[in-house]
Image (tube, rainbow, N blue to C red):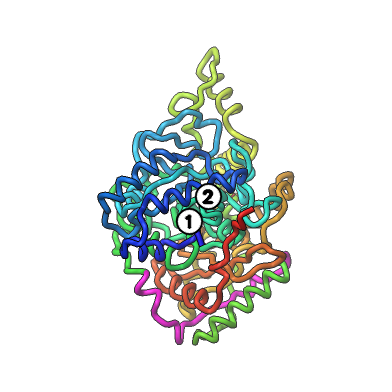
Amino acid sequence: MELCDKTIHELNGMLSKKEILPSEIMNSVLSRMEKTGGFRSFIKVFPEQALELAVRQDSAPVKGALAGIPVAVKDNMCIENKETTCASHVLKSFIAPYTATAVLKLLGAGAIVIGKTNMDEFAMGSSTETSFFGKTLNPWNKDMVPGGSSGGSATSVALGEAIGSLGSDTGGSIRQPASLCGLVGLKPTYGRVSRYGLVAFASSLDQIGPFAKDVEDAAILLKAISGYDVKDSTSVNREAPDYVTEMKKEIKGLKIGVPEEYFSDGIDEEVGSCVKKAVKDLERCGAEVKNISLPHTEYAVATYYIIATAEASSNLARYDGVHYGLRENAGNIIDLYKKTRSVGFGDEVKRRIILGTYVLSSGYYDAYYLKAQKARTLIKEDFSKAFDDVDVIITPTSPTTAWRIGEKTSDPLKMYLSDIYTISANLAGIPSVSVNCGFSGGLPVGLQLQAAHFNETVLLRAAYSFEQMNDYHKKRAFSGK
Ligand code: GLN
């Protein structure tokens, strides 16, 4: 197995025994990139800089949980003096003046950023097909989508082009691509990780989180990026536990809830049976399984697409041709705004801005936006009640495995419905993780676990126990072809 196919914890062990050097890991990742070609995981790679930093660590080893580890960062997180595009033409030539806190924390732990990954434009999408820079392809099958919006962050790790990565999750954008690419993807509790330097899509839902090859790596990355930040008033001042130690504790007596609403029509049969088998595995580890109900689940997609678009329409008002990136010439300021926004945004982003502006407009505010906020409260209460009885809720991450490129692009509603199982966690603000629980037709299937606010520990513990019973996480997408 090449170094780029190993996990962070394996590489940490080898580095500390001095069996390998950081530059060897970096060279392995860089040479993998030459072989993979065409998946478009990255918008920008920094090979020289990354190698130089790795070589520097060879002779002057740094301390930290991620020392010498090449990581990739979704291109909606700022890195000082580097372009941040959000995969949009509207941010053309925008150079970030500072680095996002989550990225600074990775660097502080010794990680080396290898590049910025491809994504749906402004993180709006479920397939990484709306990127201005071209579609990312699924690492297991090039005819399929990798999921989205953090498709590049997922594909890069699955192919060994990075050892771990960061994505952002507003309605599933970490967990769903993790599911479709056979990785672990974790959305932390809202407030666990600072959003400072993350370009805002829907501020009450956005959260940064890791992609990893296994649960232990996800725990290491989560620990590295967690914590209070004075620069993000929504980050919470609460110590992050030592996830790696905590997750290895046994799950005997852990109560697991299986909500009936997540196994309804539209779910692929094999996906359903992989998830049910996973529930049995957890039962064999000593967990107690209960059927539960989250009765307002059916309103989640509608609620999300009102709140997320409303917030997006406000957040995206700043791209006006004056403040950032692209500026189209025009005779007066209004035409400058119009031209810049018409040329700069893609269709899906425009659709969201129009939808969001509509639901916030005076005549429709009560009927849509206000009502959606009330529905959001009900969805949140469903979870609070459920967590009185169970510790973890288990569902599929996505109703299907990866679909064909182009299959859903002409039907936005079909695309939105693919987020049906992931969106509620964002509305409720709870932590949630996706782990690989099998394959169907050669494509990975994801198991989603959800826990109460700030209970990432129990989430990781259940995910880790499940992983120990299977070897799905040991399979690698890159076959050498
Ligand atoms: N697919 C969802 C959307 O399009 C979620 C995106 C995300 O989490 N960034 O809004």
Q: Residue at x 54, y 62 (%)?
A: 183
x and y, in percent, of residue 152 in the image: 55, 48
SS type, badge 2:
helix
Q: Nearer the viewer, residue 250 or 91?
A: 250
Q: Amino acid at mark 1?
A: Cys
Quarter of the rendering containing residue 48:
top left
Q: Looking at this view, is 90 or 280 the one in front?
A: 280
Q: Are marks 1 and 2 in contact (CB under 8 Å)?
A: yes
The image shows residue 1 at horizontal and vertical percentages of 51, 62
Q: Position of residue 363 (x, y in %)?
A: 60, 41
Q: Is residue 60 left or right of residue 136?
A: left
- In depth, the one of 451 and 155 nearer the eye is 155
Range shown magenta: 244-267
Would you place residue 389 above or below residue 318 in this image? below
105 vs 472: above or below: above
* Callout 1 secondary element: helix
* Residue indicated by mark 1: 4
Which residue is painted at 59% across and 43% down in the image?
A: 40
Q: Is residue 458 visible?
A: yes
User: Is residue 367 visible to us here?
Assistant: no
Residue 102 in percent (x, y) is at: 37, 50
Residue at 67% across / 72% down in the picture? 272
**Amino acid tagged 2:** Arg
Q: Is residue 88 left or right of residue 9?
A: right
Label disc, if present, on residue 32 of the rendered structure: 2
Residue 264 lies within the magenta run: yes
- State the mark number for residue 102: none
**Label 1 Cα neighbours within 10 Å, binned few <14 / some 14-19 / many ≥20:** many
